[in-house]
Amino acid sequence: MFFLWPDVFWLLMLLPLLPVAYVWLLRRRSKAALRFSSLSLVRGAARHSWRRHLPPALFLLALVGLIFAAAVRWLACRCRGCAPR
């Protein structure tokens, strides 16, 4: 496989920083103290689900796909201006 812009792969080294920043934001948010009028409200709001983390995970996966798409040399183009070199 040939890559048109292999320098774009340096961006892949920045991607592990995104989950670290996400975890940091989650921990920072949990330190804030709130006052509730009822303990049942707290129990209902404290449910943690894996679906809560799905959008950031899909965003990270989409960024990986975009970086690979930016680096790959497209060979299927047959127009006059995109002739292979």
Image: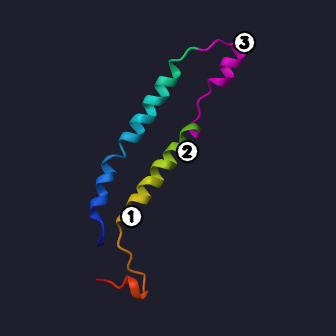
Q: Give the residue number, with chain letter if any, for mark 1.
A: 70
Q: Give the residue number, with chain letter if any, for mark 2.
A: 55
Of residues 57 and 33, the one drawn nearer to the viewer in this rendering: 33
> Residue 85's spot in the image, x, y percent?
28, 83
* Quadrant of the rendering where the N terminus is positioned: bottom left
Name the secondary structure under disc 3: loop
Q: Could you give the CA–CA distance between mark 2 and mark 1, rounded to whole angstroms?
A: 22 Å
**77 sits left or right of 14 in the view:** right
Instruction: Look at discs 2 and 1 and give the one toward the viewer.
Output: 1
Q: Which residues are magenta?
A: 34-51
**Which residue is at 52% across, 21% downward?**
30
Q: Amino acid at mark 3?
A: Ser
Q: Give the residue number, with chain letter if any, for mark 3.
A: 38
Q: Amino acid at mark 2?
A: Pro
Q: Quadrant of residue 45 in the image?
A: top right
Name the secondary structure under disc 1: helix
Residue furthest front in the image: 81
**78 sits left or right of 7 in the view:** right
Q: Quadrant of residue 66 in the image?
A: bottom left
